[in-house]
Amino acid sequence: MMRPRLGLLALLAISCGCAYGFSSSILPGHIKTVAVPLMENQSVRGGLSAALADSLVEAFIRNHTLTVVPERSADSVLDGTILEYRREPFTVDASENVQEYKVEIFVRAQFVDLRKNKVIWEEERISQWATYNFSEVGGQPAETEEQGIGRALAKLTADFLNRTVEGW
């Protein structure tokens, strides 16, 4: 039942001359490249800067909107500071043994147009979190803290990529 309605809507949109696009990039036309330096890490957890930078570089490469280059030749830079890392129990069993932990990473970030020396977007404190199984839970094997961190960093990466190339 849904397909005829969608077809009718598409036909109406075409016939009335309406145009709708899925691209809502906020990028100025002169920005074609981005640098992703290691962020300063003020948290108690080592390794987050390199892991976040690697994740961001991979995401920009897969996205194909901006080419990742060294900062000296970049049109823009995505930079910031890892402010805080938290790890706390998320679920416990009846004996009060931790089954899952929640990891959360807080970052201050900005995306800067280096050609015009202008901040395009800035977040003073953005965070993402994920959980990981500390022990076997519901048939799911135990995981490492690094696996939880990886999931939280993947969410931050998606946030930064979307904010940079899509404007949301």
Image (cartoon, rainbow, N blue to C red):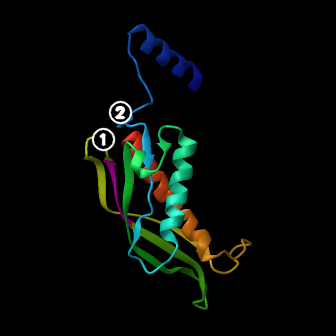
Q: Tell me where the magenta segment starts and ends, as one range.
A: 107-112
Left or right? Give the position of 59 relative to 17.
right
Q: The residue under label 2 is which amino acid type?
A: His
Q: Quadrant of residue 94?
A: bottom right
Q: CA distance from mark 2 to mark 1?
A: 8 Å
Q: The residue under label 1 is which amino acid type?
A: Arg
Helix, strand or loop at disc 2?
loop
Q: Are marks 2 and 1 in contact (CB under 8 Å)?
A: yes
Q: Residues within 10 Å of mark 1 (few under 14, many from 20)?
A: few
Of 138 and 132, the residue lying toward us: 132
First of labels 2, 1 by sequence position: 2
Q: Main secondary structure of the magenta part?
A: strand
Q: Does the magenta portion include 44?
A: no
Q: Quadrant of residue 62?
A: top right
Left or right? Give the position of 83 relative to 142.
left
Helix, strand or loop at disc 1?
loop
Residue 124's spot in the image, x, y percent? 29, 62
| Residue named by callout 2 | 30
| Residue named by callout 1 | 115
Of 116 and 10, the residue lying toward us: 116
